[in-house]
Image: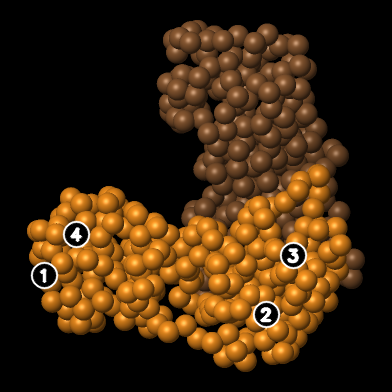
Chain colours: A orange, B brown
């Protein structure tokens, strides 16, 4: 059972994990360097725990102590009880969800390790918007992707906003980073995957015609909103696929495109 | 060719269409009542014009006069040239996109009229978030839905935020409001449509098994984020369909779910 510690000094060094949460640039550097991430809100904190992340500490306003009593009972980490006003002074914003936890990162698995047991993999290149990366993880989890691989310049899936938008799906879909981009796509291919690049280009084949759900092992690669995949990533792919579009619309937003492509890749259709 | 009018008084009554744009409640009432909507940014203003909406006036900062010269040449509406600071004082926010236009609404078509020529229709119940409604229109346009029908409590597709998120797709996909909800779903059925309700419920059949792309005329009904469809809307449907989900995830976000369902409904798969 955790110790409940009331804190009333915003400068208390025990709150260091929670300072300046609204400073994206600062947090983006600090959190991976210090091996932590922030889970926000009851649901996300519970999911992080269930996924096996160790808790460093929790920051609660008093009225959340009851709601979180089972989590408090099970952890050895210190639980800091503060006023909403103090929480705001430390973090830089009004913590609507009333509960924050600082969680310990785990070592990321090797891409090769993930690829051994996976059949459907999403690969993202330079998706550096935290909302988009969270939304894509949520869809990947729901639509049956087994793993996610990230190019070196993708945003951090464990950044607070990504975690929140993903509804905790960043904890349930395993992911790894590819160090050498796009060279490491070779590893994916060597593991028996066909590498599909999602692109609106005219040379791409319609994803329904490509029928990726019939392939044994599929890696679907997608790029950032607006830019799409780089030329070198496109060159490294086996097949270019596009989502068939109507009404002269140039593109879907990246979250919608990812969801459609995951559905096309992951759903074995019984009637086929 | 439009008249260029420099205005330096934020209280000038000619700017009335643009006042307090950040007051969502106020604008939500005012705009339909006064028969106008606001298009923001070069691309969206052009698309509104191409879709046949008449311009009431335009508000530009000086450096946008050049960029918009062809639009200015073609309209008879007054063009108000103001400083960025004055634009901010009138509208209530910093107008990043530098150009706003007040456009005249058109009379919405009858649902029955839209249904005559359409084959794939999206029906929304109580989607009252402007971002979601814009995202759904963008996907509906891209993925080949012919028309959209809205329950009486759906948000306004022509609200500034909806228009922007839709990338102008609210101009290209025709839509109508159903007055009596859910009674008017009968009209949809009488027009030869099978009414599919999208719901995560266990009684629903998987959308890939339902194979809606094989149906001659399909109306796909979806509800708001979180709540989903009401019991009475579900009762009024012909078939309940669900998107097959994995990893114990409870739901997709409404934009992702709509995109997947539109794809399943709209894309005739050549290999079938």
Coordinates of residue A220 in the picture (x, y in percent) = 70, 73
Chain under disc 1: A
Q: Secondary structure at mark 1?
A: strand
Disc number for residue B109: none
Disc 4/disc 3 C-alpha distance (Å): 50 Å
Separation of marks 4 and 2 at Cα, in angstroms? 48 Å
Nearer the viewer's eye, disc 4 or disc 3?
A: 3
If you read the primary sequence from the N terminus, does the residue marked by circle 1 or circle 2 appear first?
1
Residue ID for mark 2 = A183
Q: Earlier in the sequence, mark 3 or mark 2?
A: 2
Residue at 55% over, 37% down = B161
Q: Earlier in the sequence, mark 3 or mark 1?
A: 1
CA distance separating discs 3 and 1: 54 Å
Disc 4 residue crowd, few under 14, some 14–19, many 20+, Cα 10 Å: many
Left or right: B216 with respect to A229?
Answer: right
The alpha-carbon separation of the residues under discs 4 and 1 comes to: 11 Å
Report which residue position mark 3 lands on: A231
The residue where tag 4 is placed is A61
Which residue corresponds to the image point at 29% horizontal and 50% vertical from the top-left?
Answer: A93
Which quarter of the image is occupied by the C terminus of chain B?
bottom right
Query: Which one is earlier in the sequence, the residue at label 4 or at label 3?
Result: 4
Q: Earlier in the sequence, mark 4 or mark 1?
A: 1
């Amino acid at each position: 059972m955790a110790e409940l510690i009331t804190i009333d000094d915003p400068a208390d060094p025990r709150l260091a994990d929670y300072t300046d949460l609204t400073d994206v640039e600062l947090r983006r550097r600090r959190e991976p360097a210090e091996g932590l991430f922030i889970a926000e809100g009851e649901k996300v904190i519970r999911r992080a725990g269930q996924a096996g992340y160790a808790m460093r500490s929790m920051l609660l306003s008093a009225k959340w102590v009851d709601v979180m009593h089972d989590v408090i009972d099970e952890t050895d980490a210190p639980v800091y009880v503060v006023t909403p006003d103090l929480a705001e002074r430390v973090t830089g914003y009004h913590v609507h969800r009333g509960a924050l936890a600082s969680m310990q990162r785990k070592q990321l698995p090797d891409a090769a390790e993930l690829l051994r047991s996976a059949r459907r993999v999403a690969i993202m290149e330079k998706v550096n918007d935290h909302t988009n990366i969270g939304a894509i993880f949520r869809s990947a989890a729901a639509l049956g992707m087994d793993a996610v691989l990230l190019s070196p310049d993708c945003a951090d899936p464990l950044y607070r906003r990504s975690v929140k938008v993903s509804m905790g799906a960043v904890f349930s879909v395993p992911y790894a980073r590819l160090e050498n981009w796009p060279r490491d796509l070779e590893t994916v291919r060597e593991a028996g995957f066909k590498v599909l690049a999602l692109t609106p280009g005219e040379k791409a084949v319609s994803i329904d015609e490509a029928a990726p759900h019939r392939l044994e092992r599929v890696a679907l690669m997608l790029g950032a909103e607006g830019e799409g995949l780089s030329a070198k990533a496109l060159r490294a792919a086996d097949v270019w696929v596009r989502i068939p579009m109507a009404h002269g619309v140039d593109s879907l937003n990246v979250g919608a495109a990812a969801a459609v492509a995951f559905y096309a890749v992951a759903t074995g259709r019984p009637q086929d």
